[in-house]
Image: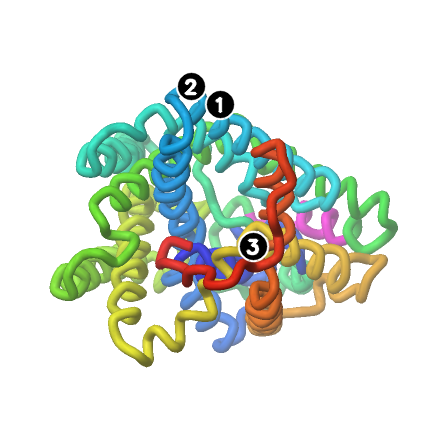
């Protein structure tokens, strides 16, 4: 269920990198900056930015423990390791297909596949040990940012986002927000955004080339090292929380209430001030950079606690149960998001909606797509056991054609599904 909520939230983060250029991670105002746009952007940055992928990373770590435990019942340690490596090497290849064939430069599958292999040797540690080791990454980032002279962390990861439909207006004299007035990087970023706009609104070849250029620009060595470190560390935390019974809702109501209060208290205290000041993820102040990972983890744990509390009453279960289907078809939904956005709505060979939407339009579109995908996932699982891409992936990993049609009496999904 957590996985389903996370994969649908990912589109809210990714859609502006699909419906526009990759440059408004630094220049969000170029997408439109009315009061309504600012509200939508702020809510997105506070509650969803970073936490969607953090939730996926936690669930990846939990899934690692669940998978290896299941495999261990039917094989020795070497067989478990071999099956695990084959499974995630295949996921790595699926991720590369997502990048180079489907043209989504923001793919996280290949990064997460490698991160899972990094986290794999730590799986036998106790839950508290895994949480502690994973948490040291956030502490190390905070120390690195505080020690740095300009408050930036090498290879800082920011959300894939962007649209420069309004870049020409801004570059020709439109007033920028006060916190942007003296930014020396505005002009180069606007020029780069305008070039990308031209490339992504012409022919298929130039569109595809522009998307690959974005991938090359995004996945520099600093980003890769940072991205792998973040994902592997968070997966270890997820594995530890699974062993402690946290992510699957096995702790007491009082525990989750306290966790929600503390996690949201810390996370919101860290996130609200920079968003209020208009600081963007890719251009942090020293304090922003130091506290970013701690705030991301805290807010995500608040989300985990809130979901666990909601599942303890009838109304909450009724509201959240449909998302279990999204969790069991997460890979298929993630790729479907790309097909809908990059191959239908926004490309020059599709409906050509690139650059025509502001923040409200894009986020609203993401929500509508997610509603349709959620309905499709539930309808699919009425007949089949798992999503089509999940079936293909697991069949290839096991070396045999797995059953796809739903078995009678299939158990209902748990929180981690």
Q: Is residue 109 above or below residue 267?
A: above
Q: CA distance from mark 2 to mark 1?
A: 6 Å
The spot of residue 33 in percent (x, y) is 54, 69
Q: Residue at x 64, y 43 (%)?
A: 392
The spot of residue 22 in percent (x, y) is 62, 49
Q: CA distance from mark 1 to mark 3?
A: 23 Å
Q: Total of numbered circles in the picture?
A: 3
* SS at mark 3 in the image: loop
Please give the residue where the numbered disc 3 appears in the rendered image: 386
Along the line of sight, which residue is nearer the eye, 245 or 44? 245
Position of the N terminus by quadrant: bottom left
The mark that comes first in sequence, 2 or 3, is: 2
| Other residues around mark 3 within 10 Å, as few (<14) / some (14–19) / many (≥20) | many
Rendering quarter of residue 144: top left
The mark that comes first in sequence, 1 or 3, is: 1
Q: Residue at x 44, y 27 (%)?
A: 117
* SS at mark 2 in the image: helix
The spot of residue 327 in percent (x, y) is 48, 57
Please give left or right for residue 256 compared with residue 393 in the image.
Answer: left
Please give the residue where the numbered disc 2 appears in the rendered image: 78
Please give left or right for residue 230 compared with residue 295 in the image.
Answer: right
Q: Are marks 2 and 1 in contact (CB under 8 Å)?
A: yes
Residue most extreme to the top: 78
Q: Are marks 1 and 3 in contact (CB under 8 Å)?
A: no
Magenta highlight range = 186-197
Along the line of sight, which residue is nearer the eye, 59 or 216? 59
């Amino acid at each position: 269920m957590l996985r389903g909520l996370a994969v649908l939230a990912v589109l809210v983060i990714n859609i502006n990198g699909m419906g526009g250029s990759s440059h408004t991670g630094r220049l969000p105002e170029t997408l439109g900056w009315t009061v309504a746009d600012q509200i939508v952007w702020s809510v997105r940055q506070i509650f969803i930015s970073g936490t969607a992928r953090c939730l996926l990373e936690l669930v990846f770590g939990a899934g690692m423990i669940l998978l290896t435990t299941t495999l261990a019942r039917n094989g020795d340690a070497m067989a478990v390791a071999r099956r695990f490596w084959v499974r995630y090497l295949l996921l790595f290849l699926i991720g590369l297909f997502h990048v180079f064939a489907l043209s989504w430069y923001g793919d996280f599958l290949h990064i997460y596949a490698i991160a899972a292999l990094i986290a794999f040797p730590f799986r036998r540690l106790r839950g508290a040990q895994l949480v502690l080791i994973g948490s040291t990454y956030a502490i190390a980032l905070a120390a690195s940012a505080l020690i740095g002279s300009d408050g930036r962390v090498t290879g800082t990861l920011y959300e894939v986002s962007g649209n420069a439909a309004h870049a020409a207006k801004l570059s020709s004299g439109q007033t920028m927000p006060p916190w942007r007035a003296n930014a020396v990087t505005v002009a180069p970023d606007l020029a780069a955004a305008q070039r990308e706009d031209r490339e992504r609104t012409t022919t298929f070849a130039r569109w595809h080339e522009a998307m690959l250029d974005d991938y090359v620009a995004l996945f520099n060595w600093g980003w890769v090292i940072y991205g792998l470190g973040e994902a592997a560390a968070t997966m270890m935390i997820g594995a530890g929380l699974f062993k402690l019974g946290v992510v699957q809702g096995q702790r007491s109501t009082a525990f989750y209430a306290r966790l929600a209060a503390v996690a949201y208290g810390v996370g919101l205290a860290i996130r609200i001030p920079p968003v209020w000041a208009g600081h963007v993820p890719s251009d942090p102040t020293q304090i922003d950079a130091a506290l970013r990972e701690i705030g991301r983890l805290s807010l995500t744990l608040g989300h985990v606690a809130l979901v666990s509390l909601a599942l303890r009453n009838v109304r909450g279960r009724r509201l959240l149960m449909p998302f279990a289907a999204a969790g069991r078809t997460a890979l298929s939904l993630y790729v479907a998001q790309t097909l809908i956005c990059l191959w239908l709505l926004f490309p020059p060979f599709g409906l050509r909606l690139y650059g025509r939407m502001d923040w409200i339009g894009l986020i609203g579109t993401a929500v509508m797509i997610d509603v349709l995908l959620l309905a499709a996932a539930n309808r699919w699982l009425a007949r089949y056991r798992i999503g089509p891409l999940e079936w293909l992936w697991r069949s290839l990993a096991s070396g045999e054609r797995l059953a796809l049609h739903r078995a009678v009496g299939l158990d209902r999904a748990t929180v981690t599904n």
